Image (spheres, rainbow, N blue to C red):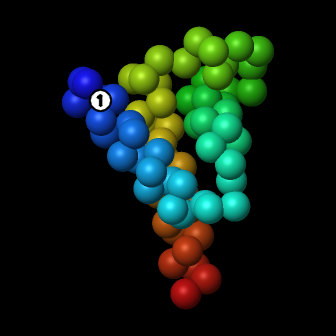
Amino acid sequence: MTKDRAELLSLIAQLSDAVPEQRLGQLVANLATVARGAIEGAIWDCEDEEFLPAARRMLEHYRGRESDVA
């Protein structure tokens, strides 16, 4: 497993904890949309290198949302 893939899987696990109401498929679809936009084929064509910054942004967003509630 590459370093990028390991980091991506770790971020997905953290996102899953941050938004447990989302199913895994929803989470991956949302990541593809953040990475590539709402375009046809985004989820199919998205590369790991594109998912990484999207996952970081999403996690930052959800963590910020949690701190606003607390």
The residue depicted at 61 percent of the width and 29 percent of the height is 32
Where's residue 52, x and y in %? 41, 34
Q: Is residue 42 visible?
A: yes
Residue occupying the point 59% across, 70% down: 65
* Numbered disc total: 1
Density class for disc 1 (Cα within 10 Å; few <14, some 14-19, many ≥20) is few
Q: Quadrant of the C terminus?
A: bottom right
Give the structural element (helix, strand or loop) at label 1.
Answer: helix
Q: Amino acid at mark 1?
A: Asp
Residue 27 visible in the shown view? no
Q: Quadrant of the N terminus?
A: top left
Q: Is residue 49 left or right of residue 7?
A: right
Q: Is residue 9 above or below residue 44?
A: below
Residue at position x 47%, y 45% in the image: 12
Depicted 10 relative to depicted 29: above or below:
below
Return the residue at label 1: 4
- In the image, 32 versus 21, the foreground residue is 21
> How far across and how far down the image is residue 29, in percent?
67, 34
View extreme (bottom): residue? 70
- Relative vertical location of residue 38 with respect to residue 31 in this rendering, above or below: above
- Residue at position x 53%, y 49% in the image: 58
Direction from residue 40 to residue 42 in the image, left or right: left
Dividing the picture into quadrants, the one containing residue 26 is top right
Q: Position of residue 17 (x, y in %)?
A: 51, 62
Q: Position of residue 31 (x, y in %)?
A: 59, 36
